[in-house]
Image: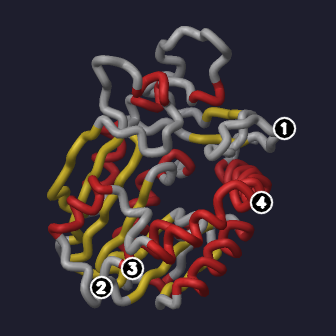
Amino acid sequence: MTTVTNIIAQNRKAWNEVAPRHAELALEEVKRSLAEVRGAYVRPELREALKQIDLTNKTVVQFNCNNARELISLVQLGAARGVGFDFSEEFVLQARELVALSGLEIEIVETDIYLIGSDYEEIADVLVATSGALCWMGDLQQYFRIVRNVLKPDGILTIHETHPFLEMFKLDRECKQDEPLVPHYSYFSDEPVASDKGLDYYSNQVYGSETVYWYHHSFSSILQAVIDAGLKIEYIRELETDLDSGYSRVGELNIKPPMSYILMARRTD
């Protein structure tokens, strides 16, 4: 289980496995929130950053869109249409259900991000990747080349992600009781990390899950991959916000490390 293809297949199994748990725990609440609150799943920091972009009549694309709650929220803020990509057929089904309820013009595409084809070249005015997207992508150089292909000329990539420094620590659900809070994962490791603690970030319960493999990318490797793809970084902000509430012990420190960030980069050709 070391090849990229095998890791992608195993991770797909793990996401498909957890999808019914997520639906049971949160899907009805997601439906209510999307119906009652315009842009419910666009966090305040991201909403503030997006003020630099007029979404009116724009096409918004999200890579690794999961159940599309964030994509739907973004389109609710004024975009003309949305397109979401995800490799989990179970989450794609949830996404299509939420899109149907929203009444918005949004297409959900089931695919491995690395296999996005020419039909989707230069469609995005804004392309978004949010928390928990990049850690599943073993080849950032290829990932951002695909981002560039999907962006229109002058289109903008917007990343709102967990900070790589934070990912040196164990998630709350991985920690034993009274375990010291110390860095656990190497910041500069290129090897995928195997975990059997599951993907239930709603209840943080372990459920005898499929093994998952994730990658730790340094901040510099993310920035360099964006630059190498031919995108011009125009905005970057580090934040002390734990996007998924998975690192509560780190968040309780009096002196907080960077816990998330927003990056915006433009295709300039």
What residue is disc 1 on? Answer: 208
SS at circle 1: loop
Amino acid on which disc 4 is placed:
Pro
Question: Which numbered marker is on residue 58?
Answer: 2
In this rendering, does residue 228 appear at all? no
Q: In the rendered image, which quarter contains the C terminus?
A: bottom left
Three-letter residue code for mark 1:
Gly
* Residues tagged 2 and 3 counted as in contact (Cβ below 8 A): no
Q: Is residue 43 visible from the viewing direction of this image? A: yes
- Asked whether the beta carbons under mark 3 and mark 1 sit within 8 Å of each other, the answer is no
**Which residue is denoted by mark 3 in the rendering?**
75
Q: Mark 2 or mark 3: which is in front? A: 3
Badge 2 marks a residue whose secondary structure is loop
Q: Are marks 4 and 1 in contact (CB under 8 Å)?
A: no
Quarter of the image for residue 128 reads bottom left
Q: Which residue is drawn at 61% across and 9% down?
A: 178
Crowdedness near tag 4: few (<14), some (14–19) or many (≥20) residues, C-alpha within 10 Å: some
Tell me where residue 253 appears, x and y as whole percent.
37, 19
Marks 2 and 3, the one that precedes in the sequence: 2
Residue 257 sits above or below residue 83 on the image: above
Residue most extreme to the right: 208
Give, as a three-letter code, the residue at label 3.
Val
Q: Earlier in the sequence, mark 2 or mark 4?
A: 4
Q: Which residue is labeled 4 in the image?
A: 20
